Amino acid sequence: HRRLRKDNLQQWVQLLSRLFTKNSTSCLIFYDLLFEKHDHGLKLYLLDCPIDDIRYIFEQICEQVLQATYFHVLEKNQQIHEANLNDNHETLIINIDNNLLILMRKFIEQLINLLDKAVVEQVKHSQGYFQLIYSYMKMNKNSIDDLLKLNTFTRLMNFLLGENIGARRWNSGQAKEFGIIHEIIATLVLAGNLTKETSNEQDLQLKNQMEIYFYGKCANRYLKEICYAFQEISPSQLICTVQLMEILSLANLSFS
């Protein structure tokens, strides 16, 4: 901690970013070192650490390793694709389930699992945590699919609203920092395309979960939270949330 605070923190991030991008082995080493602490590594540096700079820098480092992981996976996909073309074979859709991809998904799973308890306990330190989820979500379509498969939508709703739908979980001072949570929720819903017809069992389950908060027993509670959000948070931080509200207000009396 002392060494990081003494030196230029941003230079450390830039150095590690170049290293992660240049060499996939460095990404593997990062994941392995983090997982030595089992599921406590992310919690320790993203939530429990009392030093703001350390949490902020660790979030940036995690963001860089996730971006680099996708870079290496896509690069490998391209190499296989070119090899198929050179061999005059038909283009194959290949699912690369290599060790790097497995470790990244383990990382994301542990990250989302923290929502159930650890983030609630350390909500005052949670900005970097939610920023990391947001940054990962924005990387590509695969990252959104990963988050949806991990039930991130429902977990975020549980975090935001709590179990008591008759009372607000967080006070105004806390909730004014939650613009990014509303944006993550809205982006996941928009990507999931709530209005489309589907026969896929997983998509149906997700759609049913979403409808609880938009048309079912939790709709009024969620709508109240959205109204609070627009009072407490700048509209410039709620772009996707506005888009979601426009969609939900169609043929939905409670949101109109």
Image (cartoon, rainbow, N blue to C red):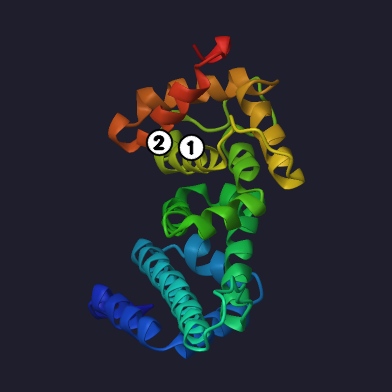
- Label 2: few (<14), some or many (≥20) within 10 Å? many
Q: Is residue 78 visible?
A: yes
Q: Disc 2 marks which residue?
A: 240
Q: Residue 233: give x, y in percent of width and height.
A: 35, 31
Res 56 quadrant in image: bottom left
Please count the marks in the image.
Answer: 2
Q: Is residue 117 visible?
A: no
Which of these two is toward me, 5 or 16? 16
Q: Find residue 201 and name its label.
A: none
Q: Please give left or right for residue 27 compared with residue 176 in the image.
A: right
Which of these two is toward me, 248 or 36? 248
SS state under label 1:
helix
Q: Quadrant of the N terminus?
A: bottom left
Looking at marks 2 and 1 on the same chain, the residue that comes earlier in the sequence is marked by: 1
**Above or below 177: residue 100:** below
Residue lying farthest right? Answer: 201
Q: Disc 1 marks which residue?
A: 186
Res 95 quadrant in image: bottom right
Q: Residue 228: give x, y in percent of width and height.
A: 44, 23
Q: Residue 26: give x, y in percent of width and height.
A: 45, 88
The kind of residue on which mark 2 rests is Cys
- Label 1: few (<14), some or many (≥20) within 10 Å? many
**Above or below 201: residue 94:** below
Q: Name the residue at 66% across, 28% down.
A: 211
Which of these two is toward me, 34 or 206? 206
Asked if the residues shown at circle 2 and circle 1 are in contact, with their CB atoms under 8 angstroms apart, the answer is: yes
Q: Name the residue at 42% across, 54% down.
A: 138
Res 103 quadrant in image: bottom right
